[in-house]
Every structure is written in structure tokens, then in C-alpha cells.
Image (spheres, helix red, strand yellow):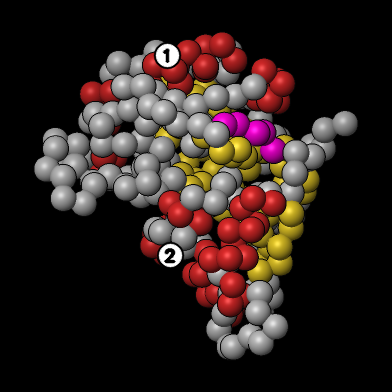
Amino acid sequence: MRVTCPALNIRFLGTGTSSGVPMIGCDCPVCQSTDKKDKRLRSSILVRSAKTTLVVDTGPDFRYQMLREKVNHLDGVIFTHPHKDHMAGLDDIRAYNFFSKKPVDIYADSLTEEAVRRDFYYAFSDTKYPGIPELNMHTIGMEPFMAGDIPVIPIQVWHLKMPVLGFRFGDFTYITDANRIEPEEMDKIRGSKVLVLNALRKQKHISHFSLGEAIDLVKELKVPKAYFTHISHQLGLHAEIMAELPPGVELAYDGLGISMEN
């Protein structure tokens, strides 16, 4: 029996690929664009109910993303996978520890938990020095779980050979870093009102959906509204690509907000 999801506000904190847009050292038209929608930090979203504030992934831009969105309270972090562009900024949750006087809940599968414990070993040391991150680790699998008052359904996708977790929050589904989804996992997405999916570039890629593949998947799943994220400078200018997309499909951009009613 599915638990009723409260009304949610979703904010795209970042919609770029691992190098971000603009990419360091690049003088292509996208990286030199003056359109704010062509400025993309590493991919992450903020998920808020009236009672709970969550972030999906803490990439290298996490600190700036939190400052930009004026997020003064954080209840939890949910991780998709252990690549650095999705977890490197975790140390900065210690500011939330300082002001709330309590640990931040961390939700990760065993693969990502291993990386967190390795990369941020000092947070798990028996001898703790002042100011280190305080993490309350929750190991998740494929079973639905509650993060505060928000029900979360994990969806396993494949990033070449790496298992990655997507997540469904009520009628909103978020998937990044994928190029394959098994049929039984696709069934978990069906019925969503909004789907967020990675679309790296137009050309085929070894571990990410291309733009065409992402569009085909949206059509197959019959989701009425879709947004693409984890976008590289190779995809093209935001305004030009938007003009090419079918009805109901848009490119997400940093700062975009979505309201989901219960």
C-alpha cells in the first residue's frame, strides 16, 4: 500500500554534467553564452514538504547551491551513487550540524555508503575533533522508505555497469546518470506526473541517455511532463534545444521550481 505523499516543492539546484557548464577552458558557444539557463552547476535537487527538507546528491557545488537558494535547514541527503560530482560536497553539511545541534540523516545504498565512509572517514572516527560532519547513516536498498514525512521509492537504473538509484517522490520521479532501465524498474515510474531524466548530449554516450533516447523513454512511459537534466555543453544552447523538443518535454535549468500537490 502506497503511503500518501504530502505536497512537495522541487527546486533544481544544478542541471549540469560532471564538468558543469561552462566547462573550464572551453570557448564553445554554449560555454560562452550569456543566457543564465546555459549556466549549469552539478546535478542536484531540493525536495521540500511543509515538514521536511531533503537534498538529492551533494556535488562539488553543494555549498554555493545552498547559499544561492537560502536553505537554512536540512533534514537529510539522499544519494544516487558514489561518483564525485554527486557526493564531493558532503563535508559542508557540518554548517547544518552547527545550527541544528544534531546530525543530518544520510540515505545511501551499500555501494555509496562504502564510498562515503571511505572519503569522509573522519566523520566516522572513534576520536572526533570539533566541527566534523555529523552523519546519521541509513542504508537503503530497493524497499520504499520514509525520509521525514516524505515517502521515497528507490528505482534501480544502470550507468553502464554501475547500479544507480533514481527516486520517486509521490508523482515526481528523478533519474540521473543512466543509460538503461530494466522493465520491472520502469514499472515503478509509470503513473508519474513528472519525470526528470538525464539527457547528456545528442550523440550516443556509453553511460548516459542521449537526447533522442531520453525523448523515446518519455514517450514509452507516457509521462505527461518531463524535464531533462545532467546536461553537457555538447547538447547545445538551451533556447535552441527547447525549440526542438516535443510537447510536454523541457530542459530543466538551475533554479527551476516545480510544485507537486498531494
Q: Which residue is the site of mark 1?
A: 247
Residue at figure coordinates x 16%, y 50% from the top left:
25
Pointers 2 and 1 in contact (C-beta within 8 Å): no
Secondary structure under the numbered disc 2 in the rendered image = helix
Marks 2 and 1, how far apart at CA: 35 Å
Residue at figure coordinates x 71%, y 62% from the top left:
137
Relative to 195, does residue 31 appear above or below in the rendering?
Answer: below
Q: Dot 1, crowdedness within 10 Å: few (<14), some or many (≥20)?
A: few
Prevailing secondary structure class for the magenta stretch in the rendered image = strand
**Location of residue 157 by image quarter:** top right
Q: Which residues are magenta?
A: 154-158
Residue 4 position in % (x across, y down): 79, 37
Residue at figure coordinates x 58%, y 88% from the top left:
130
Residue type, label 2:
Arg
Residue type, label 1:
Pro
Most distant residue in the front direction? 161
Relative to 232, does residue 76 appear above or below in the rendering?
Answer: below
**Location of residue 244 by image quarter:** top left
Q: Which residue is the site of mark 2?
A: 63
Residue 46 seen in render: no
Nearest-to-viewer mark from 2 and 1 = 2
Secondary structure under the numbered disc 1 in the rendered image = loop
Q: Quadrant of the C terminus?
A: top right
Residue 9 position in % (x across, y down): 57, 44
Confirm whether the magenta stretch covers residue 251. no
Residue 28 position in % (x across, y down): 14, 37
Q: Dot 2, crowdedness within 10 Å: few (<14), some or many (≥20)?
A: some
Q: How many marks?
A: 2
